Amino acid sequence: MNREAFFNPALEYRMKTIVHAWPEKEEVLMDAIRDFGYGGVATNPSQDHGYTSNPENLEKFDETLKNLQKKNLAYWIYDEKGYPSGYAGGLALEEHPELEAKGFYMVRRLAVQPKHSVFHLDDESDKIVWAAKYPVDHSVMNASIIEYEEMEAVPFTDTYCECDLKENEAFFIFCVKSAYEGSHLTHNVCSRSRYINILDQKAVRRFLDVCYEPIVQASPDAYRNACAVFTDEPSLVTAYIQGDEVWPYALAPWKEGLFEDFEREFGYSILPYLPQIFEGRESSYTTRVHFYQLIGKLAADAYVTQISRWCHEHGGKFSGHYLAEESLKLHVLYYGSYLEVLKATDYPGVDVLAAYPKIYHYNTTRFAQMAARKKGINGLMTELCPFIDIPYFEKEPVRYATGILNLLYLGGCRCINSYFSSDFASHDPEHLSDYHGYMSREQARWVNDYVGRIGYMLDGVQNDCGAFVYYALEDVQAKTRPEHCAQESSECDTDRSLLSLTRRIYEAGHDYLFADREDIVNAAKSAEKGCAEISGIKVENIILPAMDVIWPDAWEALETLKKYGVNVWFAEKIPTNRVGDRVRFEWYDFREESVRGPKCAETEMFKAMTETEILCALNGQEQELKLSVIESGAGSGSLEKEPMILKARYRKAGKVLYFVVNNSEADVKLSWSMDGKTCAQVWDPADGTVREIRKNEILDIVSYQGKFLMAEE
């Protein structure tokens, strides 16, 4: 570790400010950006007068990129006119309406007595894509048990179908329509344009043709010299976003050939089981898990992989951020599998709208951190965008933003693209009169030094943490059904449990990482070879949120890990339903009130625990670094009874490195001790100083700041 490099961190570790529109004398703004301590910008061609279809905009953008390089400022290329990325300011769908995002919905008709049923497509919809009827068992009170294996296809045209229904038969019609009204498209602050289908290779290729290709034609080295491409919130847009609206159509994601894709992927036809996408409980779980697995794979392949490949061909790499990072429920609704999409990026990213630490969602970065860990790359990008509760944030914007930045780096962030901007107008009031922001020159330089020093210290390392929280995506996929209005993540039991569980253990001073099914299965294999590991990190604890559904191989891996001494703790309950590859279907038998098929075995190996019991078990484990609050009082805001001290452990260059953060309104004085160590070094990102500290010597940490403790490993 180089003290000079820490004191004056390189531009690569500093924040980049986001500039969508440059002044006439753009080099004046570039000088201000450099003078205010930033490392560069995220920017784009002019979004006016035709965006990328205007050659003058492209020529000017080429000049801007060259000027940035002359000024030694790094740049990211922002790939959209507003958001969500993919529509290219409307250019992508011009003369290509067939590339618009689509969803399919179900119409259900039930004959308790014989009848003739006729269906005509409405003027909101495109076409019928499947129709079939099924026998229904009504022998159980308040139940309609569909006999899926007895499906009988019903002939249909694009707009019409009819059939005779016997007593106790159900008629299902599946139709496709545009995914637009009520979606993320019509409820954002930027645009209400229609949008491409990110499941469709041709639609995404069209986005490349009208948005990426023109830039590289005018500026051949634009992508090669960029840090990365910044894509912004592409999504499936089949989910509704406004809770006060109710729509006639409950949409599932659609692309042409979807049903054939499903059969190729899983080896069986989805057609008999299409109603299970929209209704049913235990009997429908496997179908839905498979369906959303496929959707995630298609989105990752059509959008992320295709654009990444294009970037690689032009010397660049693909990054950006996706939507609703904090919620497993929305990971499914917006992507099928958020993790599958993130893993396909070159550099995962997130968006943080929380304006101050008290409302920050710790899992915002943690899910993306899992993708970065799996890829073995240096963390993730964060778009810092103070947006929520701005009046509160504006009371002390620099202090609160610093608190958020601590949390981002603790959670795996290594690169900041920021809307938390500065008063560049003060640099040159004549030419930069429109460029105001939250920070003065002195404040911006301090924040950028602070961020740069953290980035330097954490470059190339990941949290060395033995506690893994299970990413219970299969539980949420199994229970996700299209709805006629917005689906709140608070309604999802797994999200509720994850939020509460991770908040409690983290605020008690315990770090955590997320692990998915693949991680758990691989950890079990490594345990049998001598040491349970995930990405080279020794596994000590696995914590599972409240969930009902689990993959069979994940369950068996947990049994193996428990056998080899890993703590496996289930919060609130033990999952009882198993889904996936081994057993294709599980039938809920209302007549016997039981599930025929595999269930997690009753065993003494696992017991459900309360969150408090899990926290007590963590508190009872030996901690290498022990911190005790000696004094808490001076600070800029109201004082908490118990200061919140967060920490993360790293290993770097033969050293043990802790980032200790005071996530409290009050300044604190801490005593510290580290197993086997009589002294350590304190590297302070606030002022760039490095000093020796003896065991139990007082460690002062200002409110919403952090310090590094480093010792020999």
Image (tube, rainbow, N blue to C red):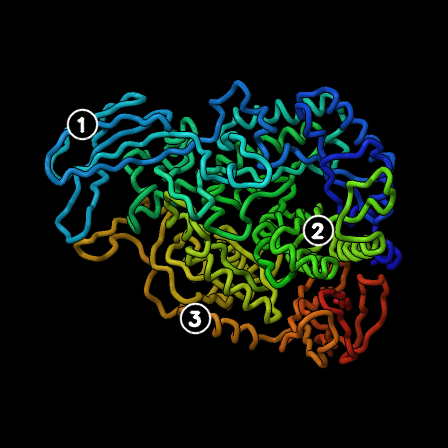
- Observer-side mark, 1 or 2, equals 1
From the viewer's side, name the closer residue of 38 and 709: 38
The quarter of the picture where residue 27 lies is top right
The label shown at residue 400 is none
| Percent of width and height locating residue 106 | 31, 36
Q: Is residue 245 above or below residue 7?
A: above
Alpha carbon separation for disc pair 1 and 3: 53 Å
- Observer-side mark, 1 or 3, equals 1
Residue type at the position of mark 3: Met
Q: Is residue 53 above or below residue 33?
A: above
Q: Is residue 202 above or below residue 486?
A: above
Q: Residue at (70%, 75%) from the top-left corner?
A: 675
Q: Residue at (34%, 48%) from the top-left corner?
A: 285
| Label 1: few (<14), some (14–19) or many (≥20) C-alpha neighbours in 10 Å | some
Residue type at the position of mark 1: Cys
| Label 3: few (<14), some (14–19) or many (≥20) C-alpha neighbours in 10 Å | some
| Percent of width and height locating residue 627 | 69, 76
Identify residue for label 3.
Answer: 609
Residue type at the position of mark 2: Arg
Identify residue for label 2.
Answer: 414
Q: Is residue 51 above or below residue 710?
A: above
| Percent of width and height locating residue 284 | 31, 46
From the viewer's side, name the closer residue of 343 and 111: 111
Q: Secondary structure at mark 3?
A: strand
The label shown at residue 163 is 1
Q: Secondary structure at mark 1?
A: strand
Q: Which mark is first along the chain, 3 or 1? A: 1
From the viewer's side, name the closer residue of 216 and 371: 216
